[in-house]
Amino acid sequence: MARATATTADKPAKASAKASAKVRKGSRTTLSEANLVDLGAERLASILMELSIDAYVKRALRLELFAEVSPDGLALEISKRLAAIAKATSRIHWRKRAAFARDLDLHLRMIQRLAESDPKTALALLMDFLDLAGSVFDRVSQPEGPIGEVFAEARDSVGDIATLAKVTPVDLADRVAQLILCDDYYVFGPLIAVAAPSLGATGQMRLRERLEAALAERPARSAGGYDAKVSVVRDALRRLADISGDVGAFIATFSETQRRFPAIAAEIGSRLLTVGREGEALAALEVAAPAVKPRGLLSGRAPEPYDPADLASWEDVYLDALQANGRQDEAQRRRWAAFEATLSIPRLRAFLKGLPDFDDVVAEDDARKIAAEFPRFEAALAFLIEWPDLAAASRLIVNRHGAINGADEDLLTAAARRLEGPFPLAATLLLRAMIRNVLTYGIAGRYKAAAQQWLEMESLAPMIADFGEFPSHQAFMDDLRALHGRKQGFRVELEALGGVF
């Protein structure tokens, strides 16, 4: 009893020491934790009671009191709230979603806090919290946004709390399987990796058995039919296979038709290469050599080209597989062909790396010539800026200025930054193109950026000794004023920066 009294007596002293450690920022009237401490406990308690007419504040205060006094009471309060949310079926109006997310977040924080003293109860509550995801997302029709972010944080908290709870691997596996099998919104896939350390080999095996059993019970769909539940379960099985390093189990989650997709073949091939199965990797990739999508996976529609990103992914792994199987010359031919077609810098670097000394210098010169003559101006400019060959980029801009697309803001802005010092004329031509595009089409959202570019162009003008075939700085400005002098929005933005239109 004396010990309890002493502990209670120590609390004010500890609180006082903690309060004194707060750093004061700003004046004494600034809303900060340090300044609020100065109001004193009684005054703050009075203010909080006045604010408790707000349901969220009242709930937060009650949970805080239970957290201080009774972990069992805190668990009961959390459980009641989760049960109430589970029973609700009404739509969550978009105006109320932020408040709902805040309420969810409050209870998640309290579960995490409870884990410090009672991790087993906290883990059970956390799993109940995650059970709500499907019904809550049904009420908002989307897993994105602040509500989804709270459930993602809850999902990612499972690993730490499970470690503290020391739950049996089999029990944890069964609970994770339950969540996966109800995952209609594809949010629990990452839970596999989060829970893996606590699952261990035994739990992972149990989880795999549960998922495979659920997969076997699903009725077969017609050819080309899609089953969302099957997709979720197979994704979980893939994640389990990756964790255990079982490439065979990973491959088994894809149908024969799916393995003919370049993106999927790339994933399979990369894993086979990692475990030293080079021949199998090459065979898996060659089966999926890009042409067109299999007709059967498009529900009877005509075949379509693959996504360029999928093709690039497949090509990356295929080149690695050729190399690993001793087919260096073929890999080099493909790298050079890919560069000629796309001006891919990664392909060129890999090609040059595989050449003997001095041969790479000649090949690099050839690559620069190909880039300078490449039909697509933007691709040529991007290559020469990134490689970099700024002199060649400057010549490209001057010689092919008619191909500059002023709407390509990201590329032109980056190129102008690189060129403005050594090649101010080339940089100016890019700035002119962007400004002209904004003013010609009246893109009000870009007026501020165009005003900044106007000032940059003015600063570069004295550095250009000869504009050659292009209008002088003054002539260009006069032309813009004559054509767009009535665009008051641009004038306002320019004058705000100190410029004159």
Image (cartoon, rainbow, N blue to C red):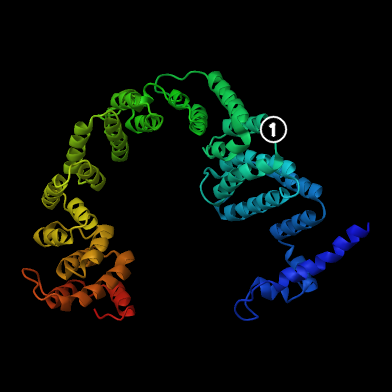
Task: For label 1, count other residues whose C-alpha is less than 10 Å away and answer few (under 14), some (14-19) or many (20+).
Answer: some
| Residue 19 appears in the rendering | yes
Q: Is residue 247 left or right of residue 150?
A: left
Q: Nearer the viewer, residue 256 or 79?
A: 256
Whether 428 is drawn above or below 231: the answer is: below
- According to the image, label 1 marks what residue? 168
**What's under tag 1, amino acid-wise?**
Thr
Locate residue 24, reporting x and y percent.
64, 76
Furthest-front residue in this view:
357
Locate residue 241, reporting x and y percent.
50, 29
Locate residue 315, reporting x and y percent.
28, 35
Residue at the image point whose x is 61% and y is 42% from the top: 159
Q: Is residue 476 left or right of residue 32?
A: left
Whether 253 is drawn above or below 497: the answer is: above
Q: Nearer the viewer, residue 147 or 25?
A: 25
Q: Nearer the viewer, residue 172 or 64?
A: 172
- Asked which quadrant contains residue 223, the reply is top left
Quadrant (top left/top right/bottom left/bottom right) for the N terminus:
bottom right
Furthest-right residue in this view:
1
| Residue 47 appears in the rendering | no
